[in-house]
Amino acid sequence: SFGEFPFRLNLLKAFYKQLRIEKYFNIDREYITETVRDHVINMVGNIYCYYSQFLPILISKIDSERKPIEKELTDKIKLGRWEDQSYYRLKETAEKSHRKIAKIMRDYHTILDRPMFMIISVDNENTQNMTKFAYPPMEIESFISE
């Protein structure tokens, strides 16, 4: 989903770095050979590099859809009246404000719950129409060491 993608990508990056550290310090794993470990390290690094290209697209999409929700939220917060002195009036106003804010937050959560394949499939369609690869090949280490 949109909301989980950056955190899962960070987790994948941390896993890649963990594998590299284990290899660097020659931490021996009885259940895995050196060549299999190298293949796993390369695979995890390549998966990270592939999916990280969608992160800027995702962030800009979330930001563009969040701005109207933020504006609506600030407008609703400004409209809440708190100058009533009666307890029951204050309670009623607070409940109304809470319901309005909860509705706005549900709208934001629906944006964050969208599946990530929407962005990936659109971007894949765009890249398949290209005649040659637009980015020069790069070293995984330089990309992930940020």
Image: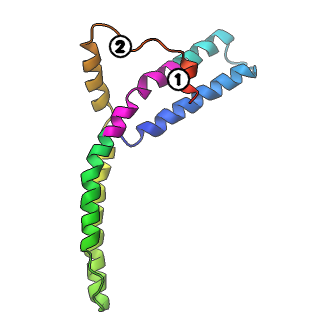
Q: Residue at x 30, y 91 (%)?
A: 85
The boundaries of the magenta stretch are: 44-60
Question: In the displayed structure, would residue 44 be above or below residue 71?
Answer: above
User: Which mark, residue 66?
Assistant: none
Which quarter shows the C terminus? top right
Q: Residue at x 29, y 75 (%)?
A: 95
From the top left corner, tell me how far across and down residue 11 is, in percent. Answer: 53, 35
Relative horizontal placement of residue 71, taking residue 51 as reference (left or right): left
Colouring: rainbow
From the top left corner, tell me how far across and down residue 51 is, in percent. Answer: 42, 26
Q: How many marks?
A: 2
User: Which mark, residue 134?
Assistant: 2
The three-letter amino acid code for the residue at tag 1 is Phe
The quadrant holding residue 14 is top right
Instruction: Give the structural element (helix, strand or loop) at label 1.
Output: helix
Considering every residue shown, the one lying at the far bottom of the view is 86
**Most common SS among magenta residues:** helix
From the top left corner, tell me how far across and down residue 117 is, in percent. Answer: 31, 30
Is residue 37 visible in the rendered structure shown here? yes
Is residue 100 visible in the rendered structure shown here? no
* Residue 56 belongs to the span the image colors magenta: yes
From the top left corner, tell me how far across and down residue 36 is, in percent. Answer: 62, 12
Q: Residue at x 53, y 23 (%)?
A: 143
The quadrant holding residue 60 is top left
The three-letter amino acid code for the residue at tag 2 is Ala
Q: Which residue is mark 1?
A: 143
